Image: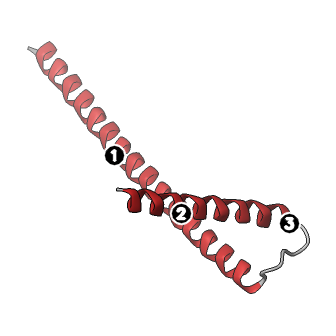
Amino acid sequence: MAEWKELGNKAKNITLAGLGKARDLGESAKLNLDNVSEEENKKRIFAEIGKRFVAAHPDPQEGYEELYRQLAEAEARIEANKTRLSQLKDEG
């Protein structure tokens, strides 16, 4: 009879340990999602800083020339896409 009680206690301990692990995994998942959200928030903030910097400094400052060039190229591609979209809309 003592063996059954001991087996029951072991099962109970294993179940409690499993619940603790599940709780830890749930908390880990939540923390990871929170971090992803905060990283996205940082990207949004950096983008806003960049927009304000470029607006305040339309000519590239030393060390920013390549980034300004890349920005101008991206803007040119966007405008070309918008033009083509407008053409497609007019044709359709």
Q: Point out the residue furthest to the front here.
A: 91
Q: Is residue 53 left or right of residue 2?
A: right
Q: Which picture quadrant has residue 39?
A: bottom right
Q: Is residue 67 above or below residue 48?
A: above
Q: Are marks 2 and 3 in contact (CB under 8 Å)?
A: no
Quadrant of the frame with the N terminus: top left
Q: Is residue 85 above or below residue 24?
A: below
Residue in the foreground of this view, choosing between 81 and 53 = 81
Q: Point out the residue furthest to the right here.
A: 62
Viewer-nearest of discs 2 and 3: 2
Q: Amino acid at mark 3?
A: Glu
Q: Is residue 57 above or below residue 10?
A: below
Which mark identifies residue 26? 1
Write down the residue under mark 2: 83
Residue in the foreground of this view, choosing between 54 and 19 = 54
Which mark identifies residue 65? 3
Label 3 – label 1 distance at C-alpha = 46 Å
Q: Does label 3 or label 1 sit earlier along the sequence? A: 1
Query: Residue sitting at 11 percent across and 16 percent down?
Result: 4
Where disc 1 sits, the SS reads helix
Query: Residue sitting at 78 percent across and 67 percent down?
Result: 68
Q: Does label 1 or label 2 sit earlier along the sequence? A: 1
Q: Point out the residue furthest to the bottom here.
A: 56
